Image: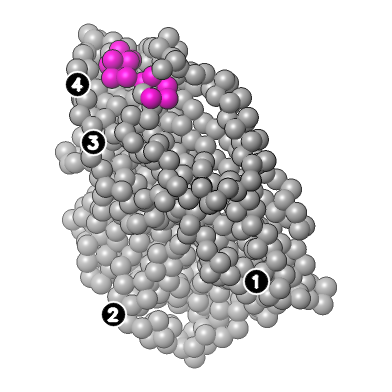
Amino acid sequence: MTTISRRSFLRTGAATAAFSVAAPVLDNAWYVLAEAEAPGYFEREFGISDTVCRKVLAGALAKGGDYADLYFEHTISNYLILEDGKVNQAYSDVALGVGIRTVKGDQVGYGFTQELAEKPMLAAAATAATIAAGAKKIPAQEFKRLKTADYYPLQTLFTAVPIEPKLLLVQSINDRCFALSRLVIKVNAQFHDQQKRILIVTSDGAKAEDLQPRSYLAAGVVAEKNGRRERAGWNFGGRRSFSYFTPAIVEETARTAVDRALVLFDAVQPPAGEMPVVLGSGVTGVLLHEAIGHGMEADFNRKKISTYCTMIGKKVAEPFVTIIDDGTKSSLLGSINVDDEGIPGQRTVLVDKGILTSYLHDKISARFYGVEPTGNGRRQSYQHFPIPRMRNTYMEAGPATPEDVIKAAGKGIYVQDVSNGQVKIGEGDFAFFVSQGRIIEGGKLGAPIKDVNIMGNGPKMLANMTMLANDFQLHQGGTGACGKGGQSVPVGFGQPTVLVKSLTVGGTRS
């Protein structure tokens, strides 16, 4: 098949999108799944044959690199945003290209191109090859296709779903938020869908394909009472099919967003200082991800940046603490059938009963440590090379009830949700804004709180976790993204209710 430049493809894609907006829904035909998941998508659509891949890989190894790989990507993203009662933004984005990596030791040469034709791909390969200076190496002459599990089966491709049912979702969110409270004065409703196709071909003979969906439905509300305004939001999503977004999901999204805004009218400013902090289940797992999980990514440890660089096999938490990073959870945002180096998605135990047992590895760090890759080599797009990144990171449940954990805290604060965080990866120092929470007084939940930060050190916080509840939850949102090294990738997180015996609370009262 003739190769297509990105510029030509964007014109074609725009015309198709314009037609889909105007086309009516006919007999629910969009529920039929297209055949496009069949293997060989990039060869059918863009002429990327094994012969072409061998030639480009040979170019990447022409100066003696140890290893090379190709990462082809075709991503279609759609956005609908409703505000002030009408859709004021609706747009699509297409990414098409290939990234070519050459590895020499722990050094990386990288080139990429938006043109899936032989000449520009060979030029990008030559750029990647300059990391090495030696005799050329020959890539594998045959590629073995990797068989993967399917942790996010699609009932229908998002490109097969017309715009009308998506419009209905955001309009329903808007209407429901206003109906739930007369105090709501503004609603922002969003629906986003994406389908990302990737093909990884490696110089040692591996070949892997994946179709990665991503979607979310989000509501943001502004409420006003006696001249005072509060705002909050919520979303549901992940690697979900369109059929996930039922009326029940619309209702829960709207109701949660409105409730979270209204409770802030009763919020007080909490005490400041060192005190026990209870982290609620589910979404507060983002704190585990940021303040602790990053320190367990292998590149930070290989470079001796992380506090955990000498801690494998040593105690980092109490024996009731087990921390997992898992790419195999069904339909969650951080799940992957295959990582961006061609390693199957898998489950990795980081902390087992308080003992640090593993880092999160890509191929480079795995070779350095003499272990197998853990399937954590991830990248934002074909314009970026892979580095160790988390997937769905969570802490397993404990034996206590949430009420027991809150009672044991005695006096402190309960954190329901956090935002706007800052973390120093090496030291693990962090500061997060508490967007939803409550005072704990007499071992019970009291008034809601606002205008408060929590500060501490990730490794110390992990060591100071003294009680875990039995209410483990994984966050079911679809907007979670993690930034590292100038790249952003979708991630998931979760945990049970946790008691940390001491963190710094930055309130306004002593």
Pair 1/4: label in front? 4
Quadrant where the N terminus sits is: top left
Residue 317 placement (x, y as % from top left)? 28, 66
Query: What amino acid does circle 4 point to?
Result: Glu
Q: State the CA–CA distance, disc 3 to disc 1.
A: 46 Å
- Mark 3 highlights which residue? 146
Q: Are marks 3 and 4 in contact (CB under 8 Å)?
A: no
Residue 194 placement (x, y as % from top left)? 50, 43
Q: Mark 1 or mark 3, which is nearer the start of the sequence?
A: 3
Q: Secondary structure at mark 4?
A: loop
- Mark 2 highlights which residue? 399
Q: Is residue 283 visible?
A: yes
Between 157 and 109, the one nearer to me in the picture: 157
Query: What amino acid does circle 1 point to?
Result: Val
In the picture, the disc for residue 142 is 4
Mark 4 packing: few (<14 Cα in 10 Å), some, or many (20+)? Answer: some
- Tell me what residue is drawn at x 53 percent, y 52 percent: 28
Range of the magenta residues?
44-57
Q: State the CA–CA distance, disc 1 to disc 4.
A: 57 Å
Q: Secondary structure at mark 2?
A: loop
Location of residue 178 (image quadrant): bottom right
Residue 367 placement (x, y as % from top left)? 21, 34
Q: Mark 4 or mark 2, which is nearer the start of the sequence?
A: 4
Residue 255 placement (x, y as % from top left)? 61, 72
